[in-house]
Amino acid sequence: MTSKIKVDNINKVSDDTNIIKKCGTTTTIGSGASNPIVVDGSAVTLGRCGGTVALASGATQTGFGRTGTVDWQTGSIKTATFTAANGEGYFANTSGGAFTMNLPAGSAGAIVSVVDYTNTFQTNSLTITPNGSDKIGGGVGGASFIANVEGQSLTFVYVDGTEGWKAVLDSTTVAVGNDSLCASVTGTGNTLTICGNFKIATFTGPGSFVVNQVSGTAAENVVGYMVVAGGGGGSAAPSNGGGGGGAGGYREGRNVPIDNFTASPLVANAPTNAVTVTAQSYPITVGGGGTGSPNPSSGTRGSNSIFDSITSTGGGGGHHCTASPPFSPGGSGGGIAYGSPSAGGSGNSPPVSPPQGNNGGTGNRTPVDYSGSGGGGASAAGGTSPPGGGDGGAGVSSSITAASVTRAGGGGGGGTTNGPSVPGGAGGAGGGAAGSATGGGGAAAATVNTGGGGGGGGSPAGSSAGGNGGSGIVVIRYKFA
C-alpha cells in the first residue's frame, strides 16, 4: 500500500509561519517576500498540461531570455537627443525640431525600437546613430540612418559585426483615429509643416497632395488654400521702354470658423469657392514664370497653377510698341510700351470672384519720353507711363503659411527718352521686378515662387531685355488635431 501524508498546512517550527498553505482551491508555497524558494533538479515543470503559469502583477522575471519585444517607455517621451538602452522602445516627438537617437553598443540579440510620436518625421527627421564603428544594415561603420517618413516606426536587432543593427520591422503606415484629416505631400522641395493645430502643405514645384484619411468631422475636410500662377515676362521694344509683366493670378480660400488665419483681401471664405477633400491623391501644378523678351518683342505669359477646382491664370506678358490689341490677358495683365494711348493687357481673365488680378497700366508718350507701363498686380492695376516707366501693381499679403508674405506683384515698365535718361518703374510689392532705366541693361527677373511679373526693358533694346516672371506657388492648410 502506498504511503500518504495528509495535511492542510505545513509551518516552520521556529516562528510558525506558513511554508505550504491550502485555502480552498488555492495552494500557497512560501512564507513572504524575504524568503526565496529554491527548486533543485535537472528539470522543473511549472503548471500542468494545458494550464497557465502567470507572473503576478508587479513581479519581474530573470533568466528566461527576451521574446523579441521591447519595454515601451511611455512615461518618457523623447524630445531631444538621447541614448537608447537594450530592450527598450521609445516615442520620439520631433514636432519641435530634429534630433538624434544614439544606439547602445552592439551585442548579439540586443533590441531597440522607436516610433514617430507626432507624425512629424517627414518635416523634422530623427537621426539614428550607431555606437562607435557599429553598422546599421551592413552599411558603413559608424554611419547614421535618417528616419524621415511620416508615422515611421522601426525595430532594430543587433546581429553581428557584419550586418550590425538590422531593421526587423519598418512600418511606414500612418494609423490615425478617424477624428482628424491625415495627408502627405510628394514632389521634390515640397514640404508639410505644423502650425499649432494645423498642417501646411507648401508646393514650390509639381507634386501631389495625398489625403490618406478624412476627418470624422465633416467641416474639417474643407481645406484652406492659396494658388498663385506664374508671372508674365517683361518686354523689350525697338527704341523705347517695354511693358512690365503682369503678376500671376492669385486665389485664396479659408475655412472659417475652423480656421481664421490672417488672409489677403482677395480671400474667399467657405462655402464660397470651397474645396472639400476626400481620401485620394490631388495632383498639384505650379506654374512657371513667363520668359522676358531678349529682342524687340513681347514677353511670354506665365503658366497656370492648379489645385483641384481652383485654377489661377498665368500673368500676361509685357508688350512692345508694335504689338496689336487686344493684348494678351492673364491673371493680371501685362504693361505696354508707349501708345496713343494704349491700355495694357486685361487682368482677371478668365473672370473669377473674388478677382484674381488687375489690368496692366496704360502706355502713353510725350515728345521726349516713350517709357513702358507697369504690369498689373493682385491688388492694383499697373502704373501708367510716362513720366518714366510705370510701377508694377502691388500684390497682396497673407499669413496662410504662418508668416505674413506678400505675393503677386506686377513688373515695372522700362524707361526710355529722347532727352535725359529716365528710370524704369518699380516692381510691385510681392515679387514684381523693377523695369530697366534708359541704357541700364537688362531688366530684373521677378522673385521665384511669388508669381511676380518681370521688369520691362529700357532702351536701347539690344542691351535691355525684359526680365523673366517669377514662378508660382500652391499652399494647402488643414486642421489635423
Image (cartoon, helix red, strand yellow):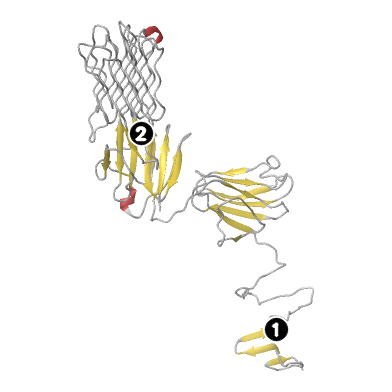
Image coordinates for residue 23, horizontal then vertical, percent: 62, 90
Mark 1, residue position:
30
Who comes first in sequence, dot 1 or dot 2?
Answer: 1
Badge 1 element: loop
According to the picture, the residue beneath numbered tag 2 turns out to be 406
Q: Residue at x 38, y 33 (%)?
A: 473
Between the residue at mark 1 and the residue at mark 2, the CA separation in whole angstroms equals 78 Å
Which element type, helix, strand or loop, lies under badge 2? strand
Q: Pinpoint residue 163: horizontal percent, then vertical percent.
A: 70, 45
On screen, residue 394 above or below 64: above
Check disc 2 and give the amino acid type.
Thr
Specify few, some or many for label 2: CA neighbours under 10 Å numbering under 14, 14-19, or 20 or more.
Answer: some
Whether residue 147 is visible: yes
- Residue 345 image label: none
Q: What is the residue that sits farthest to the front in this orientation?
A: 420
Name the foreground residue: 19 vs 16: 16
Residue name at image x 35 percent, y 46 percent: 278
What is the three-letter code of the residue carrying label 1?
A: Gly
Q: Can residue 307 be seen at all in this image of the molecule?
A: no
Neighbours of disc 1 within 10 Å: few (<14), some (14-19), many (20+): some
